[in-house]
Image: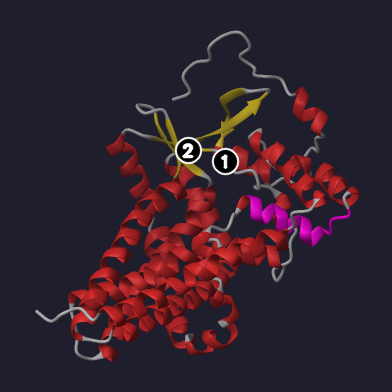
């Protein structure tokens, strides 16, 4: 067995650690960009007061706008603060942030992959949504796991989320939220092909891994768009509420994360013995940011073009097939309450009303604790 070239291994490990080292100061810079001053912090705490109470933002929109004006916060900055609260960026996002810098040039190079990928994505959408495969899958999971699917609207649901312009920075933050899933999935696809087939031709290897990535990214894009319908798995036996989108993420993260660490480590050692570990590290970084560019383009394009349709169509299928109830999970003066409001269809109609009754923070404090005062309510499940 050939010996490991420790010097090239150290250089390769150093190259692979650069994105992580850059991500830490970028994360700090993002905090400063969002705002750490008194005004931004006060507005953030005001929004958190509503979120922590389990309420939607839309009924408090007029009050929040008044607060922002009194703090001299521009509407675009106001929406950016809210986007950061509802769709927080993690360390993995900042690892991929350089992809935004090279995006204009890189998207031209990735255009063939994007053009091929969108028809594949539409085929996957047809199978998952129009043919009802996804809703049948959820129904099967519900029966097999003895869970129940319910609806709990997220705080940002309602007309307030549609105020921002398409090209506003807050919208980019929202769409960028799902990019790490696709980017790391692309690198994972290449490493699987590289490890499994060990092809002599780099061209064939890239071709096969690109095809696998397009299929995986298409499926992930449709699932992410559909699961924005605010469905929640209820596990009565363990007393858990698990949002369906987080349930999907909890499956992908360990699988892709551990798989990436294993495959990168294994291939890095192999290259340090018999190949060029530095070249392998550069290839990994190139493919990671290339996959991020493709993922960004897919996410932006698909969300704008088909996202609302997929969410609404899937929501309609869920209502027709499962007819889940819509619940509120609220906190009032330290008391957690979980009670049914109405069926999901009626709740969605309420959230989409042109005129939403506006509330003040005094109203929030004065909301009744529950309709079931002093008695234990019936089990809603």
Q: Position of residue 222 (x, y in %)?
A: 45, 62
Up-down relation of residue 160 to residue 190 (above or below): above
Task: Verify CB contact (< 8 Å) between mark 1 and mark 2.
Answer: yes
Up-down relation of residue 300 to residue 55 (above or below): below
Residue 370 picture quarter: top right
Which one is nearer the viewer's eye here, 303 or 282?
A: 282
Relative side of 152 to 185, left or right: right
Q: Quadrant of the N terminus?
A: bottom left
User: Label 2's element?
Assistant: loop
Q: On the image, numbered disc 2 is attached to which residue?
A: 323
- Residue 73 inside the magenta-drawn segment: yes
Q: What secondary structure prevails in the magenta region?
A: helix
Up-down relation of residue 213 to residue 49 (above or below): below
Up-down relation of residue 302 to residue 37 (above or below): below
Please state the extent of the stretch shown in magenta in the rendering: 72-85
Q: On the image, numbered disc 1 is attached to which residue?
A: 345
Relative side of 48 to 126, left or right: right
């Amino acid at each position: 067995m050939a010996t490991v070239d420790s010097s090239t291994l150290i250089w390769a490990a150093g190259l692979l650690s650069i994105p992580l080292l850059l991500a830490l100061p970028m994360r700090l810079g993002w905090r400063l960009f969002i705002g750490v001053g008194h005004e931004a912090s006060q507005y953030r705490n005001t929004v958190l007061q509503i979120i922590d109470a389990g309420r939607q933002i839309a009924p408090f929109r007029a009050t929040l706008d008044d607060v922002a004006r009194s703090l001299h916060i521009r509407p675009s900055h106001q929406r950016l603060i809210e986007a950061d609260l509802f769709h927080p960026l993690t360390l993995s996002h900042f690892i991929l942030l350089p992809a935004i810098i090279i995006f204009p040039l890189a998207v031209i190079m990735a255009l063939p992959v994007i053009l091929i990928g969108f028809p594949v994505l539409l085929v996957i959408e047809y199978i998952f949504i129009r043919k009802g495969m996804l809703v049948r899958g959820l129904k099967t999971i519900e029966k097999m796991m003895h869970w129940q699917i319910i609806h709990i609207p997220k705080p940002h649901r309602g007309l307030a989320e549609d105020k921002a312009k398409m090209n506003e920075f807050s919208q980019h933050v929202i769409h960028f939220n799902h990019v790490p899933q696709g980017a790391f999935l692309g690198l994972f696809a290449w490493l699987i092909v590289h490890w499994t087939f060990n092809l002599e031709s780099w061209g064939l290897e890239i071709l096969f891994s690109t095809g696998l990535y397009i299929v995986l990214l298409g499926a992930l894009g449709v699932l992410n768009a559909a699961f924005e319908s605010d469905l929640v798995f209820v596990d009565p036996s363990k007393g858990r509420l698990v949002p369906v989108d987080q349930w999907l993420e909890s499956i992908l993260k360990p699988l892709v994360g551990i798989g990436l660490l294993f495959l990168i480590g294994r291939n890095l050692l192999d290259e340090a013995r018999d190949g060029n570990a530095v070249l392998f590290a550069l290839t990994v970084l190139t493919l990671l940011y290339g996959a991020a560019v493709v993922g960004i383009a897919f996410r932006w394009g698909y969300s704008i073009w088909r996202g609302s349709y997929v969410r609404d169509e899937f929501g309609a299928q869920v209502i027709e097939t499962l007819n889940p109830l819509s619940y509120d999970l609220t906190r009032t003066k330290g008391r957690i309450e979980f009670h049914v409001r109405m069926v999901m269809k009626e709740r969605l109609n309420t959230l989409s009303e042109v005129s939403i009754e506006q509330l003040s923070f005094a109203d929030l404090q004065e909301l009744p604790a529950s309709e079931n005062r002093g008695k234990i309510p019936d089990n809603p499940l």
